[in-house]
Amino acid sequence: MLTIDRLDAAYSVLPVLKGVSIEVAAGQFVAIVGPNGAGKTTLFKTISGIVIPSAGRLVFDGQDLMSVPPSARAHLGIAHVPEGRQVFPSLTVMENLEMGAYTAAGRRAWRSNLDMILTLMPVLAERRHQPAGTLSGGQQQMLAIGRGLASAPKLLMLDEPSMGLAPAMADFIFERLIDIRRQTNLTILLVEQRVAEALETADYGYVLETGRVVLEGTNATLRADDRVRQAYLGM
Amino acid sequence: MTAPQIIENILQALVAGVLVGSLYGLMCVGLALIFGVMRVINFAHGDFMMLGMYAAYYIFTALGIHVLFGNGFGPYVAAVLAGPLLFVVGYGIHRALISQVTGTRTLGLDGEGHYAQLVLTLGIALILQNGALIAFGSMPVSIRTPLSISAWELGPFWGDFVSVFINKSRGIAALISGVVIAGIALVITHSRLGKALRASADNPVAATYMGIDVDRAHRVAFGLGVAITAVAGGLLATTYPFHPFVGLEYVIVMYAGVVLGGMGSIMGAFWGGMTIGLVQQMSTLVLPTQLQNTAIFVMFLLIVFLRPQGFFGRVVERT
């Protein structure tokens, strides 16, 4: 579904991604893990068109993404749940979800998607008329995920959904991701620093370090790998 | 002065304040879309209003609106028609020039591109003013309607005393202004377009992730803002004469109104403009006319001092 092929990206002259190749098949749950500054968020921004790569190919559903302007990529079926949540603070919870459903696919499936989102995260239903800026961090994260789901995407990209959350809330978010996956069979690309949970929930994983893929494999292979065990799982 | 006379004067000033305030409110709503909601500095806004006044004038006189709708209602039809015309002008100027310094181009720039916006729109203001001087001449003109010299009388309320006169021309202008504002408020709060505009202003990057074309949202907001202020100008032109530099007299009122009402609030901008109109007219009761504008700014400073976020200011922080 998504092919990232030898991708390079840089901020002015500082290289951030160096020949990154990642493959996400339809229906797969892929996790990208790695330390701070590895280029995970930049990779997502490149897929969404906010950062323009200096070399390499990006193909989504058979279409070359380079020829698709950033605001048109959501309409192809890519939902980006960004790092730091980035909800629309002055819009209400419902209006945020409606903006998620800005795509034609999202509008068609609005009723059923809204039901699913509010059932998964009932707190959003309670706060539906409240400005999103007044929600707690965890609630904002749920709203950001709900907003992504509302677009009825083919690919859901989640950038560190546990960032800045209390451990219990982070666990709750991970459980919801597993629920979403079970209910929708959606293709998911997840970036996480909580490596253990990420590798547990995903089918396939990549380890990104200083802009390069240093390791990849199925979740069982990665969790058995000595380097991963030592560096990320503390074993 | 007797008591009834004093009451009559106060009531009359109040009515005059509401009537002129509703037009100030309408202009402020136009600027609020551009400056308050989209956070773009537009120093040429007064001059777009001036263009709106001339547009209404020429639509009325040259396009035969005065034959079609008569001298009574023609000017109002012309003022409303100036809206769509100036929408096209605003949209076009944004596409050609202002888009260079707004929207996704200014993401992550120091001061959200405000410095470049300031210089660019100041330049546009100078070009519009001097262009209008060449095209229309420096003679003040006005759109004449017989309604501006007739009035509705309310009262008398106290025996034979205390009656209030509402100038028909200003009364109709205030009504049209109310309808336009209600329409715009509905569009901004309830329509898909309005929500997309607010989302783009809140967080342009996240709006792009939703599939919203943020640069187009900016263009539409700019065109709408210019169009609304142009309608206000056209309505104002039925009672006040105007000239190519008239924009300067109003642009300050508009910015003051938007800040008074609270950045980002459309209804706030309307009440901000209304407050300015009221203070301006009420001040004539106790102050010489020359001090009208001083009264406005004393009140402005007081409100900014006591309530810096404005009447309807957002308490929610932008991320």
Image (tube, helix red, strand yellow):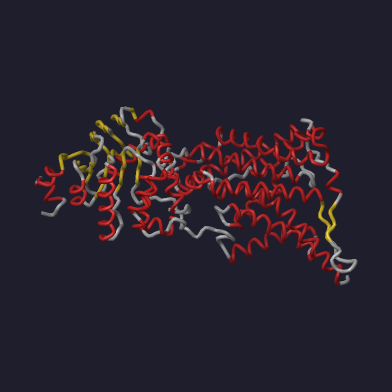
- Looking at this view, is A194 or A96 the one in front? A96
Q: x%, y% of residue B59?
A: 75, 34
Q: Quadrant of residue A70?
A: top left
Where residue A1 appears, as percent x and y from the top left, is 27, 33
- The answer to whether any part of residue A188 appears in the image is no
| Residue for point 74% across, 32% down | B135
With respect to residue B159, does A232 lie above or below? Answer: above
Image location of residue B183, percent across then percent down: 62, 46
Please state if A170 lies on the left or on the right of B217 as rendered: left
Task: Using the image as rendered, state which of residue A74 and residue B144 is in the foreground.
Answer: A74
Q: What residue do we see at 68% from left, 50% from top?
A: B178
Q: Residue at x 55, y 42 (%)?
A: B117
Quadrant containing the N terminus of chain B in the rendered view: bottom right
Q: Position of residue A135 (x, y in %)?
A: 40, 59
Task: Say whether residue B297 is visible.
Answer: yes
On screen, residue B130 versus residue A225, left or right, reads right
